[in-house]
Amino acid sequence: MQATWSTRLGVQTPVSDDLEIIHRVLQGEIDCFAELIARYRQHVARIVTRHVPGDRVAEVAHDVFVRAYGGLAGFAGQAPFEHWLSSIAVRTCYHFWRAMRRQELPVSALTEEHHQWMEQVLAAESDDRFREQVKRREAAELSQWALSHLSAENRLVLTLLYLDGHSAREAAGLLGWSVAKVKVRAHRARQTLRKLLRDEWERKDDDTTQ
Amino acid sequence: MTRLSDEDLNKLERALAESHRSRQEPSLGADWVRHVMQDVRREAARPRQALLSAGIAYTVRQAAAVAAALALILVGSVLVYTGQDTVELAALLSEEFETGEPLVE
């Protein structure tokens, strides 16, 4: 078999090698699956980190590999294992948010510090000033606050397209949606995000003028 | 009251996106791999019987659906080709069953 290479990881791994391991796992050598986990755990962690809170990454990544094992017989081997696994990782994050939505977790409100952060970002004239603001805790909190107002679908598609920088076609492949659906969802999600920021800004202004 | 312009919103979006991209993934160590493998082994031990019964249930459902569809087609074609209404057909069928000889050994 001619070896093709998976290069998105730090270390190149031959795709045919993955197929050999998968074949052995499916033949009943379950312990070989640990080799796939070891190879791809950081890749999965990287994807999951972009979508779920930091303290839940290990748990969701765990689910990704258990789901991957459960669906391994359905892996056709036409695309690299890494791509197949990425798709499972994204869908597991989607299920995570669906489950969280059902629990109706309270969303923490923004504070004066977050409003000041918005003002400082808008006032930042140099790139250095802008980057300083990006590194602040308020940036991450505001990002989480805004995403928490979106549905699981909108949240995921917004993260994939605008935050991770995937193309609509790549996002469609990861989600198992049509490209048109991804574009429509992404547009709606972005409009919702912008409205949230605009409303929050105006609310802050109202509070200060009263 | 000052309103955010589209340009302002773009700048805020860009800041949030860059903050989001800078998140660092945790390092998943050997203990974590061991825990995952425990669940994978549990999964491997569990599903054979469940899969088998799920497979049988699926086959039974499929067979029932096919049988129901065939029965509908049969009844439909009988109605069309005989030109008789359902009451007559039912009467004929019940008569057929009632007059049928019981099975004797």
Image (spheres, coloured by chain):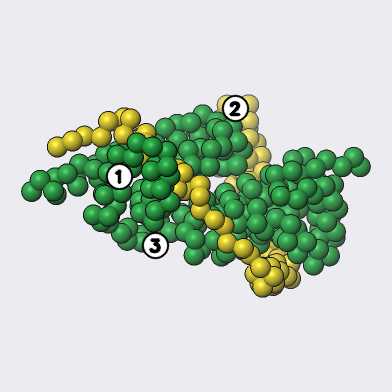
> Up-down: is B12 above or below A71?
above
- Pointers 2 and 1 in contact (CB under 8 A)? no
Query: Horizontal and vertical percent for residue A37?
Result: 71, 60
Three-letter amino acid code at the position of disc 1 = Gln
Residue at the spot of label 1: A120
| SS assignment at label 3 | helix
| Chain hosting mark 3 | A
Q: Quadrant of the N terminus of chain A?
A: top right
- Residue A98 seen in this snapshot: yes
Instruction: Please check whether the numbered discs 2 and 3 fall on a single chain.
Output: no
Q: Which chain is yellow in the rendering?
A: B
Which picture quadrant has residue A69? bottom right
**Residue A86 at x, y percent in the picture:** 64, 48
- C-alpha separation, residue under disc 2 versus residue under disc 1: 79 Å
SS of the residue under disc 1: helix
Q: Nearer the viewer, residue A207 or A171?
A: A207
The reply to whether dot 2 and dot 3 touch (C-beta < 8 Å) is no
Q: Which residue is mark 2?
A: B80
- At 54% across and 56% down in the image, what residue appears? B24
Which is closer to the viewer, label 2 or label 3?
3
- Where A139 sits versus A69, above or below? above
